[in-house]
Image (cartoon, grey):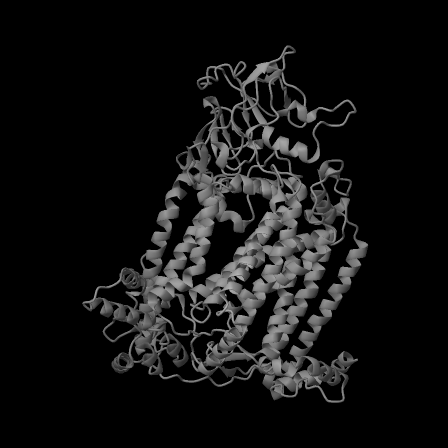
């Protein structure tokens, strides 16, 4: 309450001088200036009309498509349409504001505020009406009706949630495997050709896929296409690197996973799943361009920097009878970002 | 018909308005068609009663009140350009062969979403312009909301009775950000696909339910064929609907509360001084809509944004260096980059808890948003100030408040820098590792330092205000006394300015005294009372009270006395300036 009192009698170091005198603008007192401002506003509006006409002319005259790089790489059509539309809009805006500033009355006026709160009478009247309504409904006196109604409406939340069940299948063990399997050939990304160890020199990195993603069935239709292709690609992508075998320090049990210093890792970052491919061949570091997790490929793809917590999964390699690189098996752990059930 | 009529007399009406204060501007005569239409409508809608108060509603004028308007108008631009885009864009992930005008992609197998985006850009006239205007307007929308939020916070405009409007505004910012993310994902290009893939990783990091949420969101394993159509529905229906409703509520509350105003002569807590809605404010705001629209057209026509044709279609096995989300998603991405990995992932009882992802990208943004939402309530809890406030405060008037927001801004800015650590490393030729290590420390120390510096700075500025009030402002005129001493002449502030400066609310130190008094009584203080007291003394202690009337009068009397002593001679300033120039050591 003391705050209330203070507010009523503020200690004013300086008395409120009150609203200043209204000062007249040149356009208020000089008819020539007023006419000039009027012409300026109208001129802006006319300019807007000109721009609109230019827009329509540009729309029909300038072809788009192959010549989109003209006019400094901007696209002639886009440039002309953009500039003419901007001219039309901006001159309307500037015109109206110029009109408001120069010609419309500029006397400030005062309005009193009212408290946001309702008056005491209104509150009482509302409470009374509410009370009457509730009394007449008898909701307080009939708990059976009230509780069953709350229960019935509340239960309706369940179908609202259950109805969303078919948004997707359950995860099952889908995240635990990829289409890699024993004998699956490693193929170059894009072209899909298999790889011989002799194709790679020390320091090379090849982006790869399982060859199945490029294969066709008897009728010449791809084995994987559309969504299926993308889902499998998203998990099965690999990088293949060759380093001096003496640089590589394989983990226990992985001694026979490399072929003459050729190692294969999942390309999918264990952080949030970006494909990784920035390779420093001297240090054997592979860096993810999304969040800069860095993995040492000569040390089991150990995390040497950044936010990832786990090494990239390694694909055990072998060579088939034709001399091509193939997988010994699927990855031995799930690829990509961590998830709760991963273990 | 009526328009030609008013055009015909347009010139004379305009001049009449200027010279007669607009009382006769546009009253509809009874017999006129406009009058008849108005009567028809009023008999059914009661328009006159509704419009009676609002047509001449007063809006105070200040450049900073325009920031929210930018956000509002860019939202309108988003609606207009967005509808245009929906006429050609097809939200489908079905594989098609691109056959459009863009040479370098012709014949490629791409998703229908990507193909239709290319068509929009290269085969639909004005399509690229609309796409770029839409994206630029989105940038502008979010940027304007953020700057508007800062303006509202720094000036104390969020205080009672406007706390709920603050909450609505925060929700608008959150929804706007989500709307942006869902929007830039729709072209299904390389960059946005990488973003969606990362989002899948974020979702999977949620303990217990993450994997299920991911499968339900994507309709199976990433990427599936459902995410683009689902994001589309969210982008064009769900979030815009919510945004529209919240913007309407935001505007209604603004009208109901009436706008805040800066203190000054004739401006009090009880009134609002400014221009009437009709004509000046309506004209300025309406004109400003065209300006915002025009600026987005200019940006869309001149500056390429999100060139998806250069990124190419999404391929889950590819990525580009320098992958970055739109700027407003930058700070959580930065948090994700600098959170250390190895010590934060745990495996136990056959499950994996990936805190290195879950904390920075799910928990931290949620936490920051909650803090933002609660700021008005935290402040009013600490200050115990339950009064209505309609006069704005300058940032320096509330050092604790200002320092809090500057600390938050510093945190945001450092996180945002972290989101571009690779770009910083390239541009400034620095080690990305060292930038990251530095930022890991800086995001904690930086805000603390920023808080301390800002608080002291505000208090110094308060002192400066008091100096100006008591001893006048520095004129820049150097005076030389008869004894050869130099001094700068001070002149008293203009009355208007002096009055505005003394309007600084002295209640914050008062609230502190009250708290101390209450603590002084023998009855045991509550735990929350003690916390409040400590926060209050730190946040609101140390402020300088405005001078009292006695102090002002004494200082002015003193100044007048000194002036009498000083010998007044013409040209003194010239000579003294020359003298100073000669004496300056080089």
Q: In the displayed structure, does residue B277 sit left or right of residue B542?
A: right
Report which quarter residue A168 is drawn in.
Answer: top right
> How many numbered marks does the figure carry?
0
Write the residue at 41% across / 70% down. B393
Give how far across and how far down residue B136 sits, in percent. Answer: 61, 55
Is residue B174 rendered to the left or right of residue B355? right
Of B437 and B488, nearer the camera is B437
Residue A86, quarter of the rendered image: bottom right
Q: Nearer the viewer, residue B121 or B561?
A: B121
Give the residue furthest to the left.
Answer: B522
| Quarter of the figure that contains the C terminus of chain B | bottom left
Q: Where is the N terminus of chain B found, in terms of image quarters? A: bottom right
Q: Is residue B233 visible?
A: yes
Q: Could you tell me if residue A102 is visible in this image?
A: no
Locate residue B263, reporting x and y percent: 42, 76
Q: Residue at x 60, y 51 (%)?
A: A159
Viewer-proximal residue, B563 or B148?
Answer: B148
Locate residue B103: give its quadrant.
Answer: top right
| Left or right placement of residue B258 versus residue B555 in this view | right
Looking at the picture, does residue B323 appear above or below residue B503?
above
Q: From this view, report whether residue B421 is shown above or below residue B491.
A: above
- What residue occupies the far top of the structure in this picture? A321
Q: Position of residue B481 (x, y in %)?
A: 26, 75
Q: Picture coordinates of residue B139 (x, y %)?
A: 58, 55
Compare residues B300 and B30 and report the one nearer the observer. Answer: B30
Q: Using the image, determine if residue B425 lies above or below residue B130.
A: above
């Amino acid at each position: 309450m003391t705050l209330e009192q203070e507010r009523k009698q503020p200690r004013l170091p300086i008395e409120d001088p009150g609203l200043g005198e209204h000062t007249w603008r040149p356009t208020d007192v000089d008819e020539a200036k007023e006419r000039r401002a009027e012409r300026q506003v109208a001129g802006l509006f006319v300019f807007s009309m000109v721009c609109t006409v230019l827009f329509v002319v540009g729309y029909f005259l300038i072809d788009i498509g192959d010549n989109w790089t003209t006019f400094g790489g901007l696209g002639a059509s886009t440039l002309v349409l953009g500039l003419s539309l901007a001219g039309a809009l901006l001159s309307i805006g500037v015109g109206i504001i110029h009109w408001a500033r120069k010609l419309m009355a500029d006397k400030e006026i005062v309005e009193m505020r009212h408290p946001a709160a309702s008056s005491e009478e209104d509150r009482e009247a509302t409470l009374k009406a509410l009370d009457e309504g509730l009394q007449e409904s008898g909701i307080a006196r009939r708990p059976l009706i009230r509780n069953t109604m709350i229960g019935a409406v509340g239960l309706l939340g369940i179908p609202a949630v259950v109805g969303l069940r078919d948004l997707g299948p359950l995860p099952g063990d889908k995240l635990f495997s990829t289409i890699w399997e024993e004998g699956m050939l490693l193929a170059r990304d894009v072209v899909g050709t298999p790889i011989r160890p002799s194709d790679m020199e020390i320091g090379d990195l090849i982006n790869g896929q399982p060859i199945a993603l490029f294969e066709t069935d008897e009728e010449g239709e791809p084995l994987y296409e559309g969504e299926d292709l993308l889902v499998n690609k998203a998990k099965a992508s690999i990088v293949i690197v060759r380093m001096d075998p003496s640089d590589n320090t394989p983990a226990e049990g992985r001694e026979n996973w490399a072929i003459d210093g050729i190692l294969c890792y999942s390309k999918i970052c264990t952080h949030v799943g970006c494909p990784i491919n920035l390779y420093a061949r001297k240090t054997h570091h592979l860096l993810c361009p999304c969040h800069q997790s860095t993995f040492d490929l000569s040390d089991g793809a150990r995390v040497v920097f950044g936010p990832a917590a786990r090494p990239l999964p390694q694909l055990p390699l072998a060579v088939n009878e034709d001399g091509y690189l193939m997988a010994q098996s699927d990855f031995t752990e799930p690829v990509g970002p961590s998830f709760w059930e991963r273990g | 018909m009526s328009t030609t009529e008013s055009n015909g007399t347009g010139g004379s009406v305009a001049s009449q308005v200027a010279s007669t204060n607009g009382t006769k501007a546009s009253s509809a005569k009874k017999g006129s068609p406009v009058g008849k239409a108005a009567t028809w409508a009023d008999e059914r809608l009661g328009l006159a009663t509704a419009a009676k108060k609002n047509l001449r509603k007063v809006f105070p004028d200040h450049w900073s009140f325009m920031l929210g308007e930018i956000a509002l108008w860019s939202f309108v631009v988003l609606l207009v350009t967005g509808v245009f885009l929906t006429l050609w864009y097809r939200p489908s992930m079905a594989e098609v062969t691109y056959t459009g005008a863009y040479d370098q992609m012709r014949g490629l197998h791409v998703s229908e979403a990507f193909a239709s985006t290319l068509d929009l850009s290269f085969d639909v006239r004005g399509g690229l312009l609309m796409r770029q205007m839409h994206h630029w307007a989105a940038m502008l929308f979010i940027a304007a909301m953020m700057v508007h939020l800062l303006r509202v916070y720094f000036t104390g405009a969020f205080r009672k009775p406007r706390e709920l409007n603050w909450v609505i505004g925060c929700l608008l910012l959150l929804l706007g950000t989500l709307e942006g993310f869902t929007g830039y994902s729709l072209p299904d290009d390389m960059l946005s696909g990488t973003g969606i893939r990362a989002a899948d990783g974020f979702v999977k990091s949620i303990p217990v339910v993450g994997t299920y949420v991911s499968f339900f969101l994507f309709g199976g394993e990433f990427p599936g064929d459902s995410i683009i159509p689902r994001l589309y529905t969210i982008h064009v229906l769900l979030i815009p609907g919510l945004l529209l409703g919240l913007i309407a509520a935001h505007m209604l509350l603004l009208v109901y509360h009436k706008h805040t105003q800066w203190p000054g002569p004739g401006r009090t807590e009880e009134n609002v001084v400014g221009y009437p809605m009709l004509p000046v404010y309506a004209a300025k705001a309406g004109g400003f809509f065209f300006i915002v629209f025009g600026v987005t057209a200019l940006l869309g026509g001149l500056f390429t944004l999100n060139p998806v044709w250069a990124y190419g279609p999404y391929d889950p096995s590819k990525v580009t260096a320098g992958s970055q989300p739109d700027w407003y998603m930058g700070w959580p991405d930065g948090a994700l980059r600098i959170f250390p990995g190895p010590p934060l992932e745990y495996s136990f009882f056959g499950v994996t808890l990936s805190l290195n992802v879950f904390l920075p990208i799910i928990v931290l943004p949620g936490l920051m948003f909650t803090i933002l939402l609660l700021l008005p309530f935290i402040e009013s809890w600490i200050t115990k100030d339950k009064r209505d406030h309609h006069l704005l405060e300058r940032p320096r008037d509330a050092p604790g408040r200002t320092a809090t927001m500057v600390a938050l801004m510093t945190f945001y800015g450092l996180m945002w820098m972290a989101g571009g650590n690779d770009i910083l490393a390239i541009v400034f030729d620095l080690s990305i590792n060292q930038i990251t290590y530095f930022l890991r420390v800086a995001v904690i120390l930086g805000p603390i330092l920023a808080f301390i510096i800002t608080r002291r700075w505000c208090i110094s500025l308060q002192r400066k205000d008091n100096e100006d009030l008591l001893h006048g402002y520095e004129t820049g005129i150097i005076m030389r006394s008869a004894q050869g001493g130099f001094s700068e002449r001070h002149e008293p502030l203009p009355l208007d300015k002096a009055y505005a400066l003394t309007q600084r609310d002295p209640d914050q130190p008062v609230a502190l005294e009250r708290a101390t008094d209450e603590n002084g009584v023998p009855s045991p203080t509550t735990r929350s009372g003690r916390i409040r007291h400590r926060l209050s003394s730190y946040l609101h202690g140390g402020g300088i009270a405005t001078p009292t009337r006695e102090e002002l009068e004494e200082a002015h009397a003193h100044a007048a006395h000194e002036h009498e002593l000083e010998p007044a001679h013409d040209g003194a300033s010239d000579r003294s300036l020359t003298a100073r120039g000669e004496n300056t050591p080089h």
